Amino acid sequence: MLKLLESYITTKSASIVIRRPTEEGPGSTITLFDNQDALLDFQTNSYKDSPFAELPEDRVFCLNDRVTQRELEDLDHYKYFLKVYDVTDIMGFDICDNNNDNQSRLRLRVVRMGNEAKFSHDDRERLATIIPMMKKSLAIYSRMEIGGVSQEIYQQLLSSMGIACFILGANYEVMAKNYLAEMVLSNKDGLSIVAKKLCCIEKDDQLTLTTICQNVRQHIAQGNTQQLADKFTINRPQAGSTWGGLIRPVDSGDFIGAENNPELLLLLRDSNRRELPTPSLLIDIFGVTLAEARLTLKLLEGLSLTAAAEALGVSRNTARTQLSSVFSKTDLNSQTQLVKLVSDVLSDHWL
């Protein structure tokens, strides 16, 4: 599609940004532009003061709609990105799917470079004609993303979190699974397929799984998905080893084209696995700021306050002030207590 768009608008570079780069990560950008240095630079630095980072929805804008040339030249985005890569004009639009809690946002951008003419009124009108099509595409993407069944989410679950993911139908048949789930079944690592149904190896575990699934179904029927059953464990062949399990409902609308309706999402992870949380998770659970979350993570890694401050590029006094704020928000008064609290709270925290 991007290749067609580049011909349609006459541009050397078109890109779609699903998740904008933030301090938490590089975001998600789809582009055919083959300058990887420019893409990496954008994902790590240039977005911070870009006049095109966020646009009013459903309208096409060009660069001069957002900023004067004089204002542009004062921005780091211009000095260290646009000027470096010889970008002379930008045109694009933002659209948002407001029919879900996450409010998925898509940002489409095309650029002119070097001696190419700046975008014209005709270019603007031509790009505007694809907004309705892109809004429909974003709505479909959002439904898949919320349901947790996109290939990207599968990869994230496997590579960064070590979670086996099963999508189950009404009779516990496995309708979809990620690679780690396939390995669990292949090794009969606590679960297997019997008569086309997902079953636990041990009878007590099967009873627990069935009971929780029935409870989830009951909550769905009652329209109450806020008080779902808590986590559970499934025994594995290795002595003392278990899977931590979580069951959640799946909206069948998230599986476009599926012959049968999926009902349940089963997530499994090694109960003994312990990972450092993300800053966003600390912010959500403890109400700390981003800077306080980053400091807490350094302390969880075993660094002293002085070493943590040095690693974060702040003074020890600044780190001490941030730590005092964390203590106040968690009703603690020592680093040892803080590390223990965060470890205990997050040791079995899902997603």
Image (tube, helix red, strand yellow):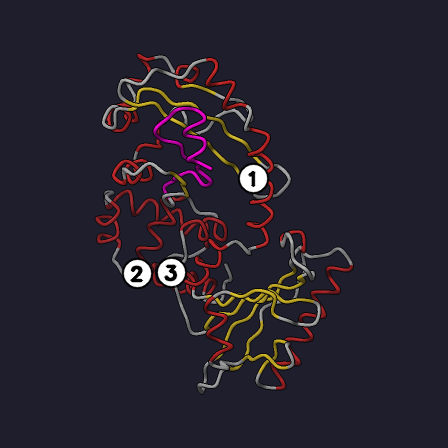
Q: Nearer the viewer, residue 285 or 96?
A: 96
Q: Which residue is mark 1?
A: 138
Q: Secondary structure at mark 3?
A: loop
Query: For the point 61% across and 66% down, which residue is it?
Result: 175
Asked whether the residues under the numbered discs 3 and 2 touch, taking CB atoms below 8 Å apart as contact, a structural biologist would say: yes
Mark 3: which amino acid?
Leu
Q: Which residue is mark 2?
A: 301
Q: Nearer the viewer, residue 219 or 151?
A: 151
Q: Nearer the viewer, residue 259 or 84?
A: 259
| Callout in the foreground (3, 2) | 3
**For the magenta stretch, what is the residue range?**
1-23
From what the image shows, is residue 262 above or below residue 171?
above
Query: For the point 54% across and 28% down, which residue is it?
Result: 130
Spatial CA distance of label 3 from label 1 is 32 Å
For label 2, count other residues whose C-alpha is less than 10 Å away and answer few (under 14), some (14-19) or many (20+).
few
Please state the horizontal and vertical placement of residue 105, each as a whole percent of the image: 52, 37
Q: Earlier in the sequence, mark 3 or mark 1?
A: 1
Left or right, residue 137 beside residue 110:
right
Mark 2: which amino acid?
Glu
Mark 1: which amino acid?
Leu
Asked whether the residues under the numbered discs 3 and 1 touch, taking CB atoms below 8 Å apart as contact, a structural biologist would say: no
| Callout in the foreground (1, 2) | 1
Q: Which residue is mark 3?
A: 276
Query: For the point 69% across and 60% down, which residue is it?
Result: 261
Q: Secondary structure at mark 1?
A: helix
Magenta-colored stretch includes residue 3: yes
Image disc number at residue 86: none
Please state the horizontal and vertical placement of residue 243, each as a whole percent of the image: 50, 75
Q: Earlier in the sequence, mark 1 or mark 2?
A: 1
